[in-house]
Image: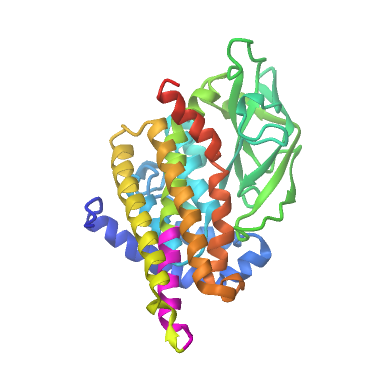
């Protein structure tokens, strides 16, 4: 179906992103998987091209674009190349909106120029070893001490934690009430060179190997009150504000990854012969790929509509949950079918489908598990 959401400026950005990925990412990606993360110089090159700062105001060194469509284009091109840049997407799609919406002008002047140039990469620290999706159970504390806060606690599963120079940390500044477990949480910008902050293990995952996912420790980290983001105790409201964009970003990547799986599988089944015929000539292959193509098309229509709704400020948390639920579950179905059509070769790391398969599994977990999303959606049905 004809897509209508992108204009000339978006396609120009697509061409820039495609060339950048082809020259700066694809040739080095296997090395990054072995190392567990891209080198910091990579982010500076992305910053030099204006990729990182596309939504950052011009006054703070960015491109001044307000539309999320540029981010969507970048996500599509990353998946199209069968690579992953999760830390970069967290920096652009998840952390930046908090600063654009809730930071003071002084905080923006301190942090946004470096975020645009790639000299200051960021992460967000919500999840703790004992909380998972239950953010109301956060135990990391920030105790007021004069004009400072003292942060103590631990975080885990933090994307981009190794290379980050600034981490947005969700911590408890007061006890929650029995009637509202979500109260008492605040967000702080913590520079990673602050005494008491340390990066723990880089976690060994089954997929997304080039994405540094770490544990973080806060041992009496002292931050000035000026590093409080927004109002004290308002973190849950702020987190909810950005959930729609975060979940849409995951859905976009899932849909694009499924499309990439279909493309590499089409190439494989037309060139691979069994019983003297191309694999593509068998009816089962045709039917399976027809199912995949239909699923991907439905996901594409949902995502395109959602991007328009996000830009218009009308994408609800429930709608974003529906889109993430559909696209991530669809991604897993499609990638699994595509790997099956590769036969034994699909299980070999040298084939892109194997990476797409292992990387797909986490999308039904982070940003809200499928089960959490179903709970949210069911509440909107008044059941």
Relative to 333, does residue 111 appear above or below in the rendering? above
* Quarter of the figure with residue 290: bottom left
Q: 49 or 204: nearer the eye? A: 204
The extreme bottom residue here reads 276
Q: Main secondary structure of the magenta part?
A: helix
- Is any atom of residue 192 visible in this view? yes
Residue shown at 61% from the left, 17% from the top: 181
Q: Quadrant of residue 268?
A: bottom left
The percent position of residue 311, horizontal first and vertical second, equals 30, 39
**Above-or-below relation of 308 to 29:** above
Tell me if 219 is positioned left or right of 340 in this view. Answer: right
Q: The C terminus lies in which quarter of the figure?
A: top left
For residue 15, above or below residue 345: above
Most foreground residue, 76 or 268: 268
Tell me: 229 left or right of 264. right
Q: Quadrant of residue 66?
A: top left
Place of residue 299 in the rendered image (x, y in percent of width and height, measured from the top left): 36, 50
Residue 382 screen position, x and y as percent: 42, 20
In the image, the segment drawn in magenta is 257-275
Please name the colour scheme applied to the rendered image: rainbow
Asked if residue 112 can be seen in this view, the reply is: no
Q: Quadrant of the N terminus?
A: bottom left
Please give left or right for residue 9 compared with residue 101 in the image: left
């Amino acid at each position: 179906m004809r897509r209508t959401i992108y204009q000339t400026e978006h396609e120009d950005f697509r061409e820039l992103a495609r060339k950048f990925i082809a020259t700066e990412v694809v040739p080095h990606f296997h090395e990054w998987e072995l190392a567990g993360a891209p080198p910091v110089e990579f982010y500076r090159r992305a910053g030099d091209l204006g990729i990182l700062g596309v939504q950052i105001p011009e006054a703070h060194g960015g491109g001044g674009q307000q539309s999320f469509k540029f981010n969507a284009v970048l996500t599509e091109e990353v998946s199209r190349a069968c690579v992953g840049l999760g830390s970069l997407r967290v920096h652009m799609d998840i952390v930046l909106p908090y600063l654009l919406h809730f930071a003071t002008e002084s905080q923006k002047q301190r942090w946004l120029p470096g975020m645009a140039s790639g000299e200051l990469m960021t992460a967000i620290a919500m999840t703790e070893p004992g909380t998972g999706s239950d953010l109301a159970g956060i135990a990391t504390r920030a105790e007021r001490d004069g004009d400072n806060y003292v942060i103590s606690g631990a975080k885990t599963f933090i994307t981009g934690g190794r290379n980050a120079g600034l981490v947005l940390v969700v911590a408890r500044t007061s006890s929650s009430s029995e009637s509202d477990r979500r109260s008492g949480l605040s967000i702080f910008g913590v520079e990673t060179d602050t005494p008491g902050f340390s990066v723990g293990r880089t976690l060994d995952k089954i997929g997304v190997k080039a994405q540094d996912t770490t544990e973080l420790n806060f041992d009496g980290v002292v931050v000035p009150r000026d590093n409080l983001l927004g109002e004290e105790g308002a973190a849950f409201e702020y987190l909810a504000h950005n959930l729609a964009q975060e979940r849409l970003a995951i859905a976009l990547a899932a849909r694009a990854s499924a499309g990439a799986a279909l493309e590499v599988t089409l190439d494989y089944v037309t060139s691979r012969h069994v019983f003297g015929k191309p694999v593509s000539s068998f009816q089962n292959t045709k039917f399976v790929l027809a199912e995949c193509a239909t699923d991907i098309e439905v996901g594409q229509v949902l995502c395109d509509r959602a991007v328009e709704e996000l830009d218009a400020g009308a994408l609800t948390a429930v709608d974003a949950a529906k889109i993430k639920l559909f696209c991530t579950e669809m991604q897993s179905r499609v990638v699994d079918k595509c790997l099956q059509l590769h036969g034994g070769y699909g299980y070999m790391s040298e084939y892109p489908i194997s990476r797409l398969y292992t990387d797909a599994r986490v999308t039904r977990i982070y940003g809200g598990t499928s089960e959490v999303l179903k709970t949210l959606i069911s509440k909107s049905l008044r059941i």
